[in-house]
Every structure is written in C-alpha cells, then in structure tokens.
Image (tube, helix red, strand yellow):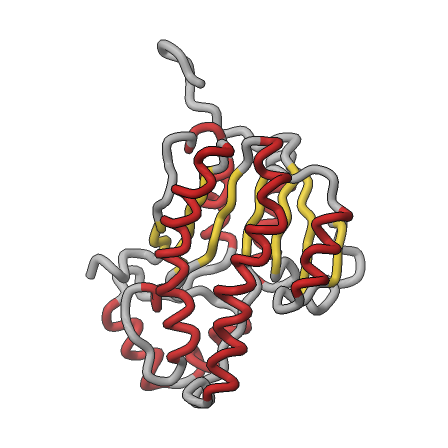
Amino acid sequence: MAAGNAAPDFSVAGKVVLISGGTGGIGMAFANAFAACGATPILTDLKPPPEGTPFRYEPLDVRDDAAVRALAAKIERLDVLIHCAGRLIRHEEHQPEVFADIVNIHLTGNMRLATAFRPHLARTKGCLINIGSMYSYFGAAMIPAYAAAKTAIVGLTKSLAVAYAEDGIRVNAIAPGWIRTEISRRGREEPAFNEKVMARLPTKRWSEPEELAGTAVFLASPAAQLVNGVTIPVDGGYVAS
C-alpha cells in the first residue's frame, strides 16, 4: 500500500499471467506487454503460437471442464488470469446450437477458468481480468450470442468481484473498442459496416491490440488496488460519442 508521497506502484515484475486465447491478436499483445514489464506469460489456446514464440504454451479448449481443471492442476502459481478466448460467427448465431457454443466460450468458459484458478489467485492475492466488448453496451443483430455473452461479462465481473473479495482477489474487465484483429476482419472489410463505425468513432481509425495492453498491465498492478468490479471501455471514445 502506498504511503505518504510515495509514487504509485505500476510494477508487475515477477507476476505469472495466464492468458486464454493467448495466441490471438489481443492475447499475444497482452503477453508481450506483460513480458516487457518483467512478468511471465502463459498462453492457452486451441492453436499453438507461431514458432519461436518465447512463452510457455498450454493447449486448452475453455469449453472442456476436465481440461480446465487439468490445466489448473499443472500450474503451481498464478497472479493474473485474463480470459481472452473468443469467437463470433456473423449471421449464424440465431441458431440455438451456435448461440449456445458462443456463450459457452465467452461466458461459461470465463466462469470455468475463474472457478478453477480461484485458489491460485487467493494464494497470491491476484486478479482476474475479463474481456468485454463494445457489444457489452448495445445490441448486435448479426451476432446476438456474442453480444449477449459480452453484456453478461459486465455482470459476471461485478458478481465475482464481490464474491472473491473475501480472498483478496480483484476482478475487473476491459471492453475493447474496434480493434484490428482476425475476429474483426470481416467487419473491417464490409464497407457499410466500416463506414458506420468510423462515423461515430472519434479517433476515426481501427485500433491496434497493443493499445489495450497498458490498461491490462495497470489493472494487474498495485496501483489499481482499489479498482474492483468495473468494466473499463478502451475504445477511443466510441461509447462516449
């Protein structure tokens, strides 16, 4: 705890950070940022990272209860858990089976990881960082499951922040704006959709995954010790406009 005129402590050096969906654009940007700050990232995903990636990789399907529990048993120490794993399927999420699968990945998968790694985070007084979306705040006709899950992430973040406080665990979320990743590629390449986004977005550009990383590092640091149960839009002012 900072005292007197001591400078805020933004350090995450020495922390172990598990990132689901870690080989994707946002997950890898987070891993690189934490590593540059002296932390040790562990990546989980369905696909391995590119050859030569310097981080530990553990294959994981966040829809698999047994696999999540097995991974938790393999990892001895954890300070920060970030759930980045996700997908969306435009025009198909009105089908109940597709809807259920998308919600399983984003929302139930988040709960699986949180439950499995709560003991680890309790031992280190660590933190959980969930990933919301701009669709946490408004509807999406083509991707209702994704929007529903991301809206629910806001409520889950609040609920886990209250539930886990007794263990000294903080729980927050980041709601990325319009980020240049593979998951957003179809939207970026659709002229009508891209024009609609740019018309509202104050920055008038798609952001890079690396631009989210500073918020994640801050939330994992002692400087954020009183930040709990909130979802922070990192969106270039889109929600505000």
Q: Is residue 191 left or right of residue 216?
A: left
Identify which residue is drawn at 27% across, 56% down: 237
Residue 134 spot, x, y in % from top left: 34, 65
Residue 49 spot, x, y in % from top left: 72, 62
Q: Is residue 3 above or below residue 184?
A: above
Identify which residue is drawn at 72% across, 62% down: 67
Image quarter where the C terminus lies is bottom left
Q: Is residue 239 visible?
A: yes
Residue 96 spot, x, y in % from top left: 46, 87
Q: Is residue 52 above or below residue 35?
A: below
Image quarter where the N terminus lies is top left
Q: Depth check: 33 or 222 in front?
A: 222
Q: Is residue 137 left or right of residue 74?
A: left
Q: Is residue 174 above or below residue 9?
A: below
Q: Quadrant of residue 75?
A: top right
Identify which residue is drawn at 57% across, 51% down: 115
Q: Is residue 94 above or below residue 68?
A: below
Residue 23 spot, x, y in % from top left: 65, 61
Q: Is residue 151 left or right of residue 18?
A: left
Q: Is residue 36 visible?
A: no
